[in-house]
């Protein structure tokens, strides 16, 4: 059975564990409706205007709360 010859330093241990912080942010695309230009995740229906792939697929109520 393999046994470590020396103690692993805190710096070396932490460098190995730090790879979880290198995750990338999700890709974002603009809405296919030219009048909307909302940013959303790819392959999703736009929640603002209801467009997907250049076609209206969802009726969205335009309830805007005014403060």
Image (cartoon, rainbow, N blue to C red):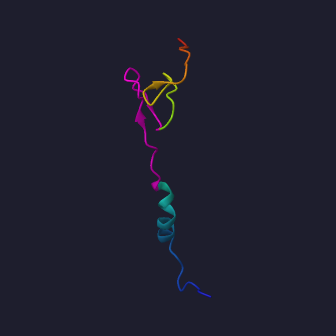
Task: Give yes or no for residue 32 being in the magenta stretch.
Answer: yes
- Tell me the residue at 49%/28% (across/down): 46
**Furthest-left residue in this view:** 34
- Tell me the residue at 52%/83% (across/down): 6
In the image, 30 versus 56, the foreground residue is 56
Task: Give yes or no for residue 15 being in the magenta stretch.
Answer: no
* Total numbered labels: 0
Image coordinates for residue 33, horizontal then vertical, percent: 41, 24
In the image, 18 versus 42, the foreground residue is 42
Above or below, 62 relative to 52: above
Residues in magenta, as a range: 22-42
Above or below, 39 relative to 27: above
**Furthest-bottom residue in this view:** 1
Image coordinates for residue 3, horizontal then vertical, percent: 59, 86
Q: Is residue 13 left or right of residue 38?
A: right
Above or below, 21 relative to 52: below
Image coordinates for residue 2, horizontal then vertical, percent: 59, 86
- Name the magenta segment's main secondary structure: loop
**Furthest-right residue in this view:** 1
């Amino acid at each position: 059975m393999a046994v470590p010859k020396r103690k692993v330093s805190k710096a070396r241990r932490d460098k190995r564990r730090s790879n979880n912080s290198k995750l990338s942010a999700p890709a974002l695309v603009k809405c296919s409706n030219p009048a909307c230009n909302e940013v959303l995740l790819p392959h999703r229906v736009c929640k603002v205007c209801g467009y997907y792939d250049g076609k209206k697929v969802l009726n969205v109520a335009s309830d805007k709360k005014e403060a």
